[in-house]
Image (cartoon, rainbow, N blue to C red):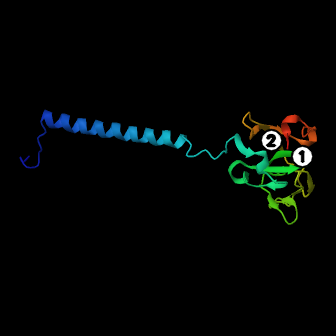
Amino acid sequence: MSELSRQNLNRREFLSYLSVGWITFTAALAGMGSLVFRFTYPNVNFEPEMSFNAGRAFDYEKGVDERWKNGFGVWMYKAEGRLVALSNICTHLGCIPSWLPAESKFKCPCHGSGYYPNGINFEGPAPRPLERYKISLTPDGTILVDKTKVFRYEKGEWDHPDAYIEV
């Protein structure tokens, strides 16, 4: 055996290579662990707030107000001395209806359900009217809409004192 073909590895070099190998292995495991953790952690929470301040009662004119539709999923409807907060989710399959002011109705683009401005369904496959959310006045006179409490027409809950405010 010739001297050139044989490599001598002393103890110090061996321990150096072994240390570098273990450090590399540990870093790879830590990287994989962080990737697994990141995979299980959600990127974004798309849920809107469950309660919000909706201004003052005199800010609303008679009819449907759409200013809270995109941010909070709520239409405000003022008529007959009452202000209500309507859900903007169709009761058929959960699509988002559009307010058609020329026809004075909500119309669902998915399957054609139609609702009067007060939320009562009158056409299409929607099985029940739109839901109403709890609405109240704060001590400083602003409107608070609480989406954790829902009122349903078919259960006779629309006349509940928390389902509307007098304006």
The residue lying at 88 percent from left, 65 percent from top is 103
Indicate left or right for 60 with 124 as reference: left
Q: Which mark is residue 6?
A: none
Q: Residue furthest left?
A: 3
Residue 120 x, y percent position in the rendering: 91, 51
Which picture quadrant has residue 45?
Answer: top right
Label 2 Cα crowd, 10 Å radius (few <14 / some 14-19 / many 20+): many
Q: Is residue 101 above or below residue 157?
A: below
Q: Secondary structure at mark 1?
A: loop
Q: Nearer the viewer, mark 2 or mark 1?
A: 1
Identify the residue at horizontal 89%, vertical 35% (top origin): 160
The 10 Å Cα crowd at callout 1, few under 14, some 14 to 19, many 20 or more, is: few
**Residue type for callout 1:** Gly
Helix or strand or loop: what does disc 2 sit on?
strand
Task: Please name the residue that numbered disc 1 is placed on.
Answer: 81
Instruction: Using the image as rendered, state which of residue 95 and residue 64 is in the foreground.
Output: 64
What's the amino acid at mark 2?
Tyr
Q: Point out residue 141 in the picture as x, y percentages from the top left corner.
A: 75, 38
Q: Looking at the image, is mark 2 or mark 1 earlier in the sequence?
A: 1
Write down the quadrant of residue 110 in the picture. Answer: bottom right
Q: CA distance from mark 2 to mark 1?
A: 17 Å
Q: Is residue 135 left or right of 11 when viewed as pictured?
A: right
Q: On residue 133, which mark appears?
A: 2
